[in-house]
Image (cartoon, rainbow, N blue to C red):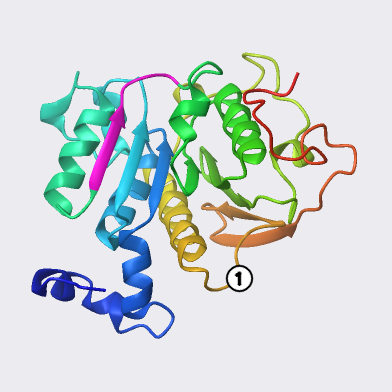
Amino acid sequence: MDFTEEQVRRYARHILLPQVGAKGQDALLSSRVLVVGAGGLGSPVLMYLAAAGVGTLGIVDDDRVDLSNLQRQIAHTTDRVGEHKVDSAYRTIRDLNPDVRVEAVAERLQPDNVQDLFSGYDLIADCSDNFETRFLVNDTAVRGGKTLVSAAVLQFQGQLWTVRPGGEGPCCRCLFREPPPAGDGPSCAEAGILGAVAGVLGTLQATEILKELLGIGEGLCGRVLVYDALSARMRTITAHRDPECPLCPEPASANFGLVP
């Protein structure tokens, strides 16, 4: 734990916490997290993980910054409209914390690249905005033995849960067996979203990721946190493994991608 003087000053409030300390901060600096999506959820996740000193952040997103994104996607700025989101997010992280190494991939997550993209990371953060990607992330993380922290938002609501390797708790397919048919549910572009709601869920998601990396507190494995902005209520729902889940009973293997 050979911190520079600048690092001691930067992370002083972490080091003061008994649950973190110098050992925990060193663990964060050695951690590698892949964030899928650099939008409404990915923006606060990336910024808080970078501020916390997570040593390596991977970002996967093939989209470009659009003016309509800026109402909630706080990692991007007006002068970056038209720029790849991963490049914009890289610039934000670089300015926030030069300690952090960023591995930016301007590609869409697909079954033929997901194994390579997930390899080498300790934890996966699902900040995607569509069901196909969400299930691909879940399936690959479970089969690859990766901890997954996943969040979703729409309009005034959001959900957050954690999937740990080894069948400790349910995966996404235990809760929702199959993704709905394409076009069966509205997107944020169709139904809208209060921008700050994405910030609330993304910040909670970053908190759960840090807890998992540090091994502290009670996580959301086996529970789903549900947030309703209009009623100003937050609750957790107990979630159990589905004994007939097509994914969980199988051991980690080299079979990546969506469950057949």
- Verify whether residue 115 appears in magenta: no
Residue 45 location in percent, x, y?
37, 49
Give the residue at x 66% y 40%.
Answer: 142
Q: Alpha-carbon neighbours of circle 1 within 10 Å: few (<14), some, or many (≥20)?
A: few
- Viewer-side residue, 3 vs 80: 3
Query: In the picture, residue 51 is in which quadrant?
Result: bottom left
Give the percent coordinates (x, y) of residue 189.
Answer: 45, 23
Extreme residue in the right direction? 244
Q: Could you tell me which secondary element the residue under label 1 belongs to?
A: loop
Q: Nearer the viewer, residue 158 or 112?
A: 112
Q: Which residue is drawn at 21% across and 37% down?
A: 90
Is residue 196 in view? yes
Seen in the picture, residue 185 relative to 42 is either above or below; the reply is above
Which residue, given by chain and number where applicable, does mark 1 sit on?
218
Magenta: predominant secondary structure element?
strand
Determine whether, in the image, residue 231 is placed left or right of residue 247: left
Magenta range: 101-108
Q: Where is residue 247 in the image (x, y as percent from the top left)?
A: 77, 34
Residue at (47% x, 49% y) in the render: 122
Q: Can residue 41 be seen in this view?
A: no
Residue type, numbered disc 1: Glu
| Residue 102, image quadrant | top left
Quarter of the picture holding the C terminus:
top right
Whether 170 is drawn above or below 213: the answer is above
Quadrant (top left/top right/bottom left/bottom right) for the N terminus: bottom left
The picture places residue 197, in percent across and down from the top left corner, at 44, 47
- Looking at the rendered structure, the number of numbered marks drawn on it comes to 1
Q: Nearer the viewer, residue 95 or 68?
A: 95
* Magenta stretch contains residue 102: yes
Q: Quadrant of residue 194?
A: top left
